[in-house]
Structures are given as structure tokens and as C-alpha cells.
Image (cartoon, rainbow, N blue to C red):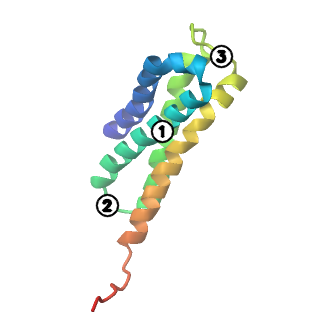
Amino acid sequence: MKKYISYGFLIWLIPFMVSFFIFPIHQSNRALFESVMAVILFTTTLFFTQKIFRLREGNFARDGLTIGLMWAAINLGMDAVVFLAPTPLQMSLTDYISDIGLMYIIIPLTTFTIGGMLSEKDTDHPQEEHS
């Protein structure tokens, strides 16, 4: 469980750190900034999903959904501390949801999709014979 939590934190931390380096793009080309951040979040989630499923057996689809929802909750919780609490980065809840929060749907979509694909592959399907 500790590993799952630390991976969820890293899925939040890596894009957060990248955003500081590319923040000047936010002012000059907001659409590019948002696209890059979505790609970073997806790539980070995909990387840690692969690490988790490499070590697991069982119902991959269910586990993917559970892990994805846990990771999304961790990300939302970390953002609440940074963006919703009184900090220099504070924003309104409405602004937060439309600017950042909604993007976290990427996390459970990724983990559940990968888990579903692994579940399908894991079931007993007759092998096609190649002549």
C-alpha cells in the first residue's frame, strides 16, 4: 500500500515540478501549456501503472479502477493544499476545477483501461493456429 501511495504522490509531483519549468508558456500560449501538462500527466500515470501491474496478479480491471481512483484522490488532495488553501497559488474552486482538477480524470481512465486490457489478455482465449 505504501508503494501505491508513493506512486500517487509522484504522479502529482512530477507534473507539478514540470509546470514550474514551463510556466512561461502558460502566459504566451496557454493551449500549448495545457496540452503539454496533459501529456506529462498521462505519461507519468502510464509509467507508474506499468510498474504496479508488473507486480500484480488478479482482477486487473477492478484493481486498475481502484488504484486510479486512489491516485486521483491523492492528486486532488495535494492540489487542495496548494491551490485551494490560502497560499500564493490560491484559486477559486470553480477556476481550479476548470483549469486543473478535471484533468485528473486521466488517471483512473488510464489505470482502468490498462487493467481492462490486461484482464482480457489474461482470460483463456483459444490461440489461433498459424499455418
- Residue 80: name its quadrant: top right
Q: Which one is nearer the viewer's eye here, 107 or 131?
A: 131
Residue at the extreme right of the image, as rendered: 94
Q: Is residue 84 left or right of residue 68?
A: right
Q: Position of residue 4 (x, y in %)?
A: 36, 40
Q: Secondary structure at mark 1?
A: helix
What amino acid is labelled 3 in the image?
Met
Residue 39, numbered label? 1
Amino acid type at circle 2 is: Glu
Q: Is residue 74 left or right of residue 91?
A: left
Measure the alpha-carbon separation of dots 3 and 1.
23 Å
Query: Would you name the residue on which mark 2 appears?
Result: 57
For the residue pair 124 and 62, the one nearer the viewer reads as 124
Q: In this rendered view, identify the residue nearer to me: 79 or 42.
A: 42
Location of residue 18 with respect to 113 vertically, above or below: above
Whether tag 3 and tag 1 are in contact, CB under 8 A, the answer is no
Tell me the residue at 59%/24% (across/down): 29
Residue type marked 1: Val
The residue tagged 3 is 91
Up the image or down, 70 lies above or below 92; here it is below
User: Which percent across, then down, holds residue 104?
Assistant: 55, 38
Seen at 57% across and 42% down, the residue is 105
Q: In the structure shown, which secondary structural element does the residue marked by tag 3 occupy?
A: loop
Q: How many marks?
A: 3
